[in-house]
Image (spheres, grey):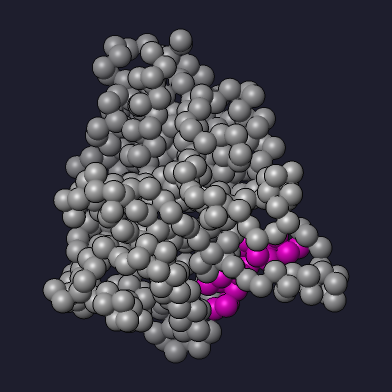
């Protein structure tokens, strides 16, 4: 198998690409996927023609600059240039790509070839915010790193053991059998990592009875109930649109609303798709932003719809926690992760304000001073409350490394 441009095997590296609708997160790891050598994010949020390029190396401060790249090919080249300029010259032996939706067939890491690219293209409509940019990043990276092994790691893999009563929707059963209408579940790379990390923190690894509720709250949001590191229920479904309210996505709504809009207001599928995926959620309600920090600041300044958006956001998370507590028969630990879950003490406080009925009690001082991977529960709480820094890129690097080992 041809690898990247020469070099001894132990001097090689694994690159991870995690493409979103307007960002490309990246991280370079050593050959064994133990140490992150460099990483960052390229962000096109504020402009179509230029991007903000964040770059960090181990031991160094973050730097950010504006670059002209407006597409994934330019962005991947930019990453390569920046690594070289910083003296990080280890040839890339593998590129691990985060792919949100693997559809019915792809539920384990796979080698990306033309056939897999075609398969990913076919299922792109199931995750319109995620799969098309991921595919664009795959194409760009295959051009920039033609000698590397490209591996797809799927968000949906973690949920391949979900119980059937969670997988099937209460629709005609033939739709499940003939059309493949079923729950897949997403953010699996993050939820799997958090489940493992929580078990370590609680010193309950290999305990099949450990009951966790993980709230991944970023631009996309989902909650998953986990027993003994296996998922038993999750809020996202056939697509990453179901479940909790998100930055621009509605989450669950009455499907009758869509029928009404189609019949009475002549709205078509592509228009509804745009509204539900890109113009709803925190953005749709607040009218301010999809970014939680900006909505929070507006709410503090007295913006009523921003306050409403945050109350709705927290209420829906609480409802999911309540439902999952019943599914699991109790909670050993509630976990907050991703941008909002990890960083917003006010959101954590609002969510936990309704959980006294479950005797899930927050310690406000610990909440204020929380750091990554810490316990912020009150001493009287029957459940732990953990803030965990999710490690999606590192998990993808490890999965890629395992894949390469199995391949050899
Ligand atoms: P992610 O998708 O995990 O990168 O998370 C993005 C979300 O996290 C955005 O809504 C951000 O506003 C939010 N976020 C990031 N940092 C903070 C912070 N310090 N306080 C509140 N929200 C934050």
Q: Is the residue 64 above or below the residue 211 in the image?
A: above
Q: Nearer the viewer, residue 202 or 28?
A: 202
- Say which quarter of the image contains residue 377: bottom left
Q: Nearer the viewer, residue 61 or 39?
A: 39
Which quarter of the figure is the C terminus placed in? top left
- Does the segment drawn in magenta span residue 77? no
Q: Where residue 184 sits: x, y (%)?
A: 55, 49
Q: Is the residue 203 above or below the residue 404 in the image?
A: below
Identified at 67% across, 30% down, the residue is 118
Q: Nearer the viewer, residue 340 or 380?
A: 380
Chief secondary structure of the magenta span? helix
Q: Is the residue 264 above or below the residue 305 in the image?
A: above
Identified at 63% across, 71% down, the residue is 253
* Image position of 211 (left or right of 69): left
The magenta span reads 271-287
Observer able to see residue 191: yes
Identified at 33% across, 33% down, the residue is 398
């Amino acid at each position: 198998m041809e690898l990247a441009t020469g070099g001894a095997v132990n001097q090689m590296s694994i690159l991870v690409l995690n493409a979103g609708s307007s960002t490309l997160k990246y991280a370079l790891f050593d050959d064994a996927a133990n140490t992150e050598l460099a990483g960052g994010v390229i962000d096109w949020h504020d402009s179509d023609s230029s991007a903000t390029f964040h770059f960090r190396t181990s031991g160094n401060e973050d730097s950010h600059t504006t670059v002209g790249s407006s597409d994934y090919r330019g962005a991947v080249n930019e990453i390569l240039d920046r690594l070289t300029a910083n003296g990080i010259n280890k040839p890339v032996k593998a590129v691990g790509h985060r792919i949100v939706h693997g559809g019915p067939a792809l539920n384990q890491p796979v080698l990306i070839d033309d056939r897999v690219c075609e398969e990913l293209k076919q299922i792109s409509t199931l995750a319109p915010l995620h799969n098309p940019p991921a595919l664009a990043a795959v194409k760009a990276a295959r051009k920039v790193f033609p000698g590397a092994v490209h591996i797809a790691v799927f968000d949906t893999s973690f949920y391949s053991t979900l119980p059937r009563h969670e997988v099937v929707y209460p629709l005609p059963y033939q739709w499940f059998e003939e059309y493949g209408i079923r729950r897949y579940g997403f953010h699996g790379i993050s939820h799997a990592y958090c489940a493992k990390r929580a078990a370590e923190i609680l010193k309950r690894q290999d305990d099949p009875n450990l009951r966790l509720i993980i709230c991944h709250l970023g631009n996309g949001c989902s909650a998953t109930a986990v027993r003994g590191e296996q998922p038993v229920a999750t809020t996202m479904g056939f697509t990453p649109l179901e479940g909790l309210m998100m930055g621009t996505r509605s989450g669950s709504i009455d499907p009758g609303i869509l029928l009404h809009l189609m019949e009475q207001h002549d709205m078509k599928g592509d228009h509804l798709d745009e509204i539900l995926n890109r113009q709803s959620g925190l953005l749709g309600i607040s009218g301010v932003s999809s970014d939680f920090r900006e909505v929070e600041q507006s709410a503090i300044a007295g913006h009523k719809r921003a306050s409403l958006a945050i109350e709705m956001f927290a209420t829906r998370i609480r409802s999911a926690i309540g439902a999952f507590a019943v599914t699991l028969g109790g909670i050993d630990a509630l976990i907050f992760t991703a941008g909002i879950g990890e960083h917003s003490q006010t959101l954590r406080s609002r969510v936990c304000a309704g959980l006294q009925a479950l005797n899930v009690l927050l310690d406000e001082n610990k909440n204020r001073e929380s750091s990554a991977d810490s316990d912020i529960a009150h001493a009287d709480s029957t459940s732990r409350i953990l803030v965990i820094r999710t490690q999606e890129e590192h998990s993808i690097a490890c999965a890629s490394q395992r894949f390469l080992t199995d391949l050899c």
